[in-house]
């Protein structure tokens, strides 16, 4: 395989060191940069233009979902592998919808990281067997659900999902507006539409919804 340039983004130094050691063991592979938060990950990706970015889904400043969107927009040739401890089908689908080609659990790092990086570098999708089972189970469950709440969730846009996550972790409308680059009025409108669409009546219900569907950790 040709020389491969890789960026590692994770807020835990131990994970970055472990991933770097695993990847450096492969001939022709080189870790060209590391990032400890989401904003730095996007900046490094734009600067270094790696072939593959290994991105942790839960980082400060900007989470891995938004990092993936921004990297795929700014550096389309960079393939993204999502690295995470979350094994819910909702999180997997959010990562893939954002543009990630692969989804790897940190528990599978040692065994599967080289295979995952190789696969997505070749433009293939990579889901570890456990993740594939989670996605299939989630799909089958979704197919069998007909409640109004589930129909509403299906219609939720990626931007609305991001706002749900931010609200659920305690962000104000003003903070959401600043983080997403929108006006406070637009953030307020999104919040009202989300509550109406999902049939929610309080922030407590929204937080429960976010935890139930894996948008935030329980």
Image (tube, helix red, strand yellow):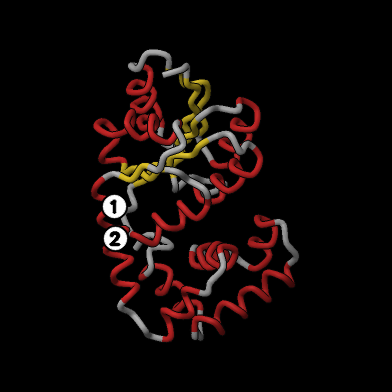
Find residue 57 and report its horizontal and vertical position in percent. 44, 47
> Which residue is at the far top?
27
- Near-viewer residue (96 or 186): 96
Establish if 71 lies above or below 130.
above
In which image quadrant can residue 27 be found?
Answer: top left
Q: Residue at x 58, y 48 (%)?
A: 69
Q: Please, what secondary structure does the residue beneath circle 1 have? A: helix
Give the residue at mark 2.
136
Q: Residue at x 33, y 47 (%)?
A: 85
Residue 177 shown left or right of residue 145 in the figure: right
> Where, quadrant-wise, is the N terminus in this rendering?
top left
Asked if labels 1 and 2 touch by Cβ distance under 8 angstroms, the answer is yes
Find residue 14 and report its horizontal and vertical position in percent. 35, 30
Q: Which mark identifies residue 132?
A: 1
In which image quadrant can residue 134 be found?
Answer: bottom left
Q: Which mark identifies residue 95?
A: none
Q: Residue at x 65, y 61 (%)?
A: 175
Label 1 crowd (10 A; few <14 / some 14-19 / many >=20): some
- Near-viewer residue (107 or 120): 120
Q: How many marks?
A: 2
Establish if 90 lies above or below 39.
below
Establish if 175 lies above or below 4.
below
Q: Residue at x 68, y 76 (%)?
A: 189
Q: Please, what secondary structure does the residue beneath circle 2 have? A: helix
In which image quadrant can residue 183 be found?
Answer: bottom right
Residue 96 shown left or right of residue 74 in the figure: left
């Amino acid at each position: 395989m040709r020389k491969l340039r890789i960026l590692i983004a994770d807020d835990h130094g131990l994970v970055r060191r472990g991933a770097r050691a695993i990847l450096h063991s492969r001939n022709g592979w080189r870790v060209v940069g590391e990032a400890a938060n989401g904003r730095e990950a996007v900046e490094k990706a734009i600067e270094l233009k790696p072939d593959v970015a290994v991105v942790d889904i839960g980082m400060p400043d900007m989470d891995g979902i938004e990092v993936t969107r921004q990297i795929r927009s700014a550096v389309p040739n960079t393939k993204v592998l999502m690295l995470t401890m979350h094994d819910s089908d909702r999180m997997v689908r959010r990562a893939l919808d954002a543009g990630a080609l692969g989804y790897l659990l940190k528990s599978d790092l040692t065994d599967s990281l080289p295979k995952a990086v190789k696969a997505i570098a070749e433009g293939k999708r990579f889901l570890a067997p456990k993740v594939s089972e989670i996605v299939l189970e989630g799909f089958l469950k979704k197919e069998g659900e007909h409640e109004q709440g589930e129909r509403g969730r299906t219609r939720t846009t990626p931007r609305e999902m991001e706002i749900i996550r931010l609200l659920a972790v305690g962000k104000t409308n003003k903070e959401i507006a600043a983080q997403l680059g929108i006006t406070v009025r637009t953030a307020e409108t999104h919040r009202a539409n989300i509550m109406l669409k999902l049939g929610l009546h309080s922030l407590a219900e929204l937080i429960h919804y976010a935890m139930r569907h894996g948008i935030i950790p329980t």
